[in-house]
Image: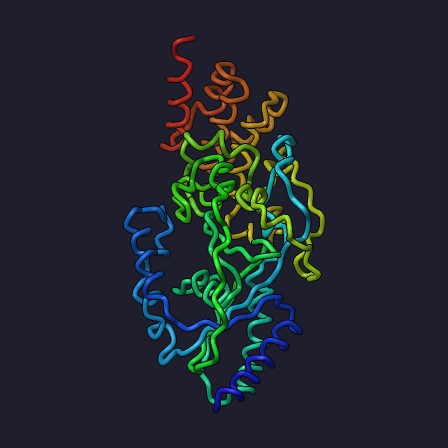
Amino acid sequence: MDSQVLTDKVDTLRREAFRIGFDGFGVARPETAQAGERFQQWLDLDYDGEMAYMGRWNDKRRDMSKVLPDIQSVICLRSNYFTAKKDLGFLGRKQTGDVSLYALNEDYHHVLTDRLKELEEIVKRELPDCNSKIYVDTGPILEKPLAQNAGLGWIGKHTNLLTEGEGSWYFLSEILLDVALPPSKPAVNRCGTCRECIDICPTRAIVAPYVLDSRRCISYLTIELKGAIPVEFRKAIGNRVYGCDDCQIVCPWNSYAVATKDNEFYSPGETWELVDLIRLDEEQFRERFRRSPIKRLKRRGFLRNVAVALGNCGDPKVAPYLIDVLADEEPLIRAHAVWALGELLGQGALDEIDKRLADENDALVLEEVRQLKTRYSHAR
């Protein structure tokens, strides 16, 4: 096909993408070797923490022909999920859990996969005999550098993608093609000297502009980390029970964000009172979060986070809910309840913990008890 025909095809695909529900469209060349080198340096510093999947298939990230043979183009797509203005006021509502804005909605993987499949069919109609692959935040591709090269936005100092006039409250997805489409103009970095995202981070996870140490990031600690949350970060987590939006909340570019018109990204108006969340049993958890991204955390991880948030709420009146949790069958939850009770009741928690956990034999729980007793041994 000549260049004008391909340009017309891209215009058609852009219109179809917007009709289907995407609100950003661009085309990038599959040139990721340089970004792959930076990613490898990040891995070498162990900034991926326990996310072992991040280190797999990095050869494919550097050479996308190993993902799709003869790849020539990547269609990059943006989907606005901004449903409500958010500020840091949630920090003052200490008995209400804070959930990252994207997770208040239906799991975006399901929504966007259906849309990508629809657009992929149109691509194959417009470009017969092409081969393709779709991705929604999955697979060994460097979607942010690709999206930047496709003109959708630039990678900000907090490592999220930012778009001039729109902000960063959106999802990314891609269609890989073995057809050479006219590429879009890359986006220009407009962060300037601003460092608000760096300064606001409660755990100092943004260790340098454009460099995130995931091991310190609250989103990692409350979602990706499967075991015990390091004690050094628990106070900083505050009442965040799933993810953290602080760096996006303070970003000046997000003052331009406009609420999405996409009905599938609006939440049903759940309440997030911590004393209600800590009492969820397995069946209640599965039912409440069956269509939510939170389900991948599983009950043990979610109630671990809720226990930490209760420990940070500052109100000893919630202690009975945590005392009840000491009988939970999941050691990870019991362990964090021990810490939370220590925060709320101080030395007064020890008698209750000794009574409730007299027959405890899980190493994780016993270690939390040991640390608590060590902390107050001087007062006994």
- The residue furthest front is 193
Task: Mark yes or no: residue 291 visible.
Answer: no
The image shows a total of numbered marks equal to: 0
Q: Residue at x 68, y 49 (%)?
A: 84
Residue 88 placement: quadrant: top right
On-image quarter of the C terminus = top left
- The residue furthest left is 44
Instruction: Report x, y in % for residue 319.
Output: 58, 24
In depth, the one of 36 and 53 nearer the eye is 36
> In the visual, does 249 lie left or right of 49?
right
In depth, the one of 89 and 327 nearer the eye is 89
Instruction: Report x, y in % for residue 368.
Output: 41, 27
Q: Residue at x 30, y 59 (%)?
A: 37
Residue 146 placement: quadrant: bottom left
- The residue furthest bottom is 1
Q: Is residue 222 above or below residue 341?
A: below
In depth, the one of 280 and 227 nearer the eye is 227
Q: Is residue 332 above or below residue 77?
A: above
Q: Colour mode?
A: rainbow
Q: Residue at x 55, y 86 (%)?
A: 126
Task: Mark yes or no: residue 313 visible.
Answer: yes
Instruction: Report x, y in % for residue 161.
Output: 50, 56
Instruction: Report x, y in % for residue 89.
Output: 65, 35
Q: Is residue 275 above or below residue 176?
A: above
